[in-house]
Amino acid sequence: MNSRKIEILVGLFVALAVAALLMLALKVADKGFSGNGETYELKAKFDNVGGLKERSPVKVGGVVVGRVGSIKLDEDDFTPVVTLVISEEYDQFPTTSSVSILTSGLLGEQYVGLQPGFLLDENDILKPGQFIEDTKSALVLEDLIGQFLFSRNND
Amino acid sequence: MEWFAGIGRSTMGMAAGLGRAAYLLFGSLVARPQPLKNFPLTIRQIYVVGVQSLLIIIVSGAFIGMVLALQAYTVLVDYGAEQSLGPMVALSLLRELGPVVTALLFAGRAGSALTAEIGLMKATEQLSSLEMMAVDPLRRVIAPRLWAGIISMPLLALIFSTVGILGGHAVGVDWLGVDSGSYWSVMQAAVDFNDDVMNGVIKSVVFAFVVTWIAVFKGYDAVPTSEGIGQATTQTVVYSSLAVLGLDFVLTALMFGTH
């Protein structure tokens, strides 16, 4: 085993460890490299996004069709704008579609449920970057309990 | 009286051993370090203790990640919380299992080999001959091995954790059907780079230092007979495993205990 070969192997070992650290930093601890396959973006305004996170799934009838790209506040009216990154495969959603923030299971993760509407006209297909008008916010447990108590006091 | 004498003898023996171990550390690392001159020797030792341990680290990392995912899934699925599989696997590996299991495997795979090698050098009087040639064995033999251990083990622990998380992904996502995006996104929300990844690295640097120190000291201090070398090798594995597990508790309490 000559020393040149040993140096190369040690170099590879260190490079492997650095790659592992990079993966831990970028993929495990922080934002990952997303993007597999062609995608397009849709936007939706919610009153409250609850516990929705970036990269949460977007589902149609339980089938994952995309991910949440980014969640930002609109600078004019201070409502959250959620960017949905949808697979190019599913590009035929009508403009009458609605989105809502749902929870999987009682304590599970929150995701975006997309409910396709009726296609009235051939031109009424959601185009990339277009806003989905019909949105339903996340269910916040505290609000729900508050409403319940309020309605009981009225009785 | 004989009983008290026994206690006194073993206490003095322990103190003398600690002193010799501290002297070895001082002589090899602190007193006039020559890192540049010994750099090629260190590279060679990194190859021996680091590169040659890669296979066992990668294989056990993959299997530990897989079995973690499998076990966690059976519990979490009852509560509909199988999305929490990602943080469960990642946090267990980064905080505890990565540094600890790597240190235990390293003690068994590389630490015992270091002890046996140095012990045999002593038994065959190679160390004495080095001294005869006015070469300091502490600097020529011990220091490169110590540095190689301290450099290699954190790298091995990082590789272990990464492979384990990928193994957990293979079982959880590809086999049991947890959503891949949830696996990563919930993990990303739960794992903090400084709190979890860097604390794991700090842990494995501490373990690396302790395990390698015990290994080279036990070899350097071994009784120069075949029996003595065997005993020293056993002691290396036992002492470093106990030290790692004990220190792990202390470090965990310091790092994550106050939340």
Image: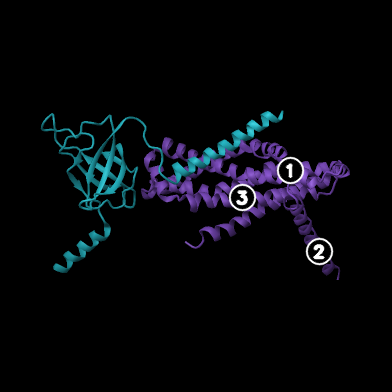
Chain colours: A cyan, B purple
For marks 1 and 2 on the same chain, the one whose residue lies earlier in the sequence: 2
Query: Within the image, what quadrant is residue A115 found in?
Result: top left
The location of residue A129, given as percent across then percent down, is: 23, 37
Q: Is residue A102 above or below residue A142?
A: above
Q: Is residue A62 visible?
A: no
Structural crowding at the residue carrying mark 3, measured as other residues with C-alpha within 10 Å and reported as few (<14), some (14–19) or many (≥20):
many
Residue at (61% x, 34% y) in the render? A11
For this view, does B233 lie left or right of residue B56? right
Query: Within the image, what quadrant is residue A59 found in?
Result: top left
Alpha carbon separation for disc pair 3 and 2 = 30 Å
Residue that badge 2 annotates: B12
Alpha carbon separation for disc pair 1 and 2 = 27 Å
Assign a secondary structure to mark 3.
helix
Residue that badge 3 annotates: B205
Tag in front: 3 or 2 = 3
Residue that badge 1 annotates: B114
Q: Amino acid at mark 3?
A: Val
Q: Amino acid at mark 2?
A: Met
Assign a secondary structure to mark 2.
helix
Q: Is residue A52 visible?
A: yes
Q: Is residue B9 above or below residue A30?
A: below
Q: Are marks 3 and 2 on the same chain?
A: yes
Q: Amino acid at mark 1?
A: Leu
The location of residue A6, given as percent across then percent down, is: 67, 32
For marks 3 and 1 on the same chain, the one whose residue lies earlier in the sequence: 1
Q: Disc 3, disc 2: CB below 8 Å? A: no
For this view, does A68 lie left or right of residue A137? right
